Image: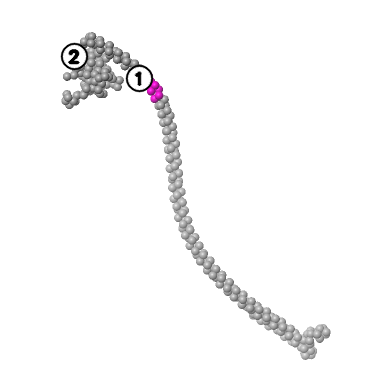
């Protein structure tokens, strides 16, 4: 029910009450209706009675006019309120449409973000798996590096020990070199004395041929002929390597017999005659043709 309808009901109620009051008064009092209707306010105040019905109706009409003015004012305010409400509703609907569009956009963005987040989570899982694998490989490499470092330390210690031993060997080698030079000097002197003695004896070895049985880096050569063949200590023998033809034979050097046994002998290479490395199976002879 609208405000206007409520006002009409109130007015009707008031009018009904007025007419009912009038009817009751007429019924209860047998007074002059003219006085009762036309009694002015001053007289009613002097007599202590109610004003006339005409004045009451006039007052009621004034009240009704006031109520009608208020009704019109309220109607105007209602219309203005309705217009404002419609305008507000229009604004709210527009805002609601914008909010709906924003919500749809946000939902689409949220769906896209959710998909991107899912993809990122999958990539993160792959990255975590790869990181775990890399960490395991790093741990394995760390263990290998530690083992390599330990091996390096052991090798360094071994190298230090070997360097110490090498220094000792170098020192010993220097001493041996000095002793070797001393022995070479003595040997040279012995050679000179032996050559002089051999010249004095003028001994000539018989014609002998043999092969090298063994050879050492110290210059000693074992040959396959001995004193049963007529070889004696101090004899000289030539060492050579046979080729395909006599012209391709290679001369290797001369040895001096220093020890003789029945079927073999040991000779020492004369350094000034050395022309190659003497090996097993090379040939020896007291004279070359």
Residue 8 is covered by the magenta coloring:
no
Q: Is residue 14 visible?
A: no
Mark 2 or 1, closer to the camera: 1
> In this rendering, does residue 162 appear at all?
yes
Q: In which quadrant will I find the N terminus?
A: bottom right
Q: Earlier in the sequence, mark 2 or mark 1?
A: 1
User: Which quadrant of the structure image shows residue 268?
Assistant: top left
Q: Is residue 61 left or right of residue 112?
A: right
Residue 173 belongs to the span the image colors magenta: yes
Q: Name the colouring of the figure.
A: one colour
Chief secondary structure of the magenta span?
Answer: helix
| Residue at mark 1 | 177
Residue stretch in magenta: 166-175
Q: Residue at x 83, y 84 (%)?
A: 46
Mark 2–mark 1 Cα distance, whole angstroms, equals: 37 Å
Percent across and percent down for residue 287 are: 19, 17
Q: Residue furthest top?
A: 200
Q: Residues within 10 Å of mark 2 (few under 14, many from 20)?
A: some
Query: Considering only vertical position in the picture, is 146 above or below 5?
Result: above
Judging by the rendered image, the residue that carries numbered circle 2 is: 206
Relative height, residue 36 to residue 179 (above, below)? below
- Residue at left 72%, top 83%? 62
**Which residue sits at x=50%, y=65%?**
104
């Amino acid at each position: 029910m609208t405000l206007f309808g409520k006002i009409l009901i109130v007015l009707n109620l008031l009018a009904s009450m007025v007419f009912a009051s009038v009817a009751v008064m007429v019924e209860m009092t047998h007074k002059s209706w003219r006085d009762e209707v036309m009694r002015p306010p001053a007289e009613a105040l002097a007599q202590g009675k109610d004003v006339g019905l005409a004045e009451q109706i006039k007052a009621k009409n004034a009240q009704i006019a006031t109520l009608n003015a208020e009704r019109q004012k309220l109607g105007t305010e209602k219309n203005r309120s309705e217009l404002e409400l419609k305008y507000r509703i229009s604004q709210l609907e527009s805002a609601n449409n914008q909010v709906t569009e924003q919500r749809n956009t946000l939902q689409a963005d949220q769906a896209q973000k959710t998909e991107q987040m899912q993809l990122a989570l999958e990539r993160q899982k792959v990255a975590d798996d790869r990181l775990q694998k890399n960490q395991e490989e790093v741990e394995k490499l760390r263990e290998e590096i530690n083992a390599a470092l330990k091996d390096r330390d052991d090798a360094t210690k071994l190298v230090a020990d070997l360097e110490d031993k090498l220094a000792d060997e170098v020192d010993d080698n220097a001493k041996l070199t000095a002793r070797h030079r001393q022995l070479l000097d003595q040997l040279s002197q012995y050679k000179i004395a032996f050559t002089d003695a051999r010249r004095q004896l003028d001994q000539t070895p018989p014609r002998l041929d043999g092969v090298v049985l063994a050879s050492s880096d110290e210059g000693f050569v074992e040959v396959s002929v001995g004193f049963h063949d007529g070889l004696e200590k101090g004899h000289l023998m030539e060492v050579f390597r046979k080729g395909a033809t006599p012209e391709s034979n290679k001369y290797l050097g001369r040895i001096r017999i220093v020890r003789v046994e029945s079927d073999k002998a040991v000779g020492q290479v004369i350094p000034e005659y050395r022309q190659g490395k003497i090996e097993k199976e090379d040939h020896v002879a007291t004279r070359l043709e």
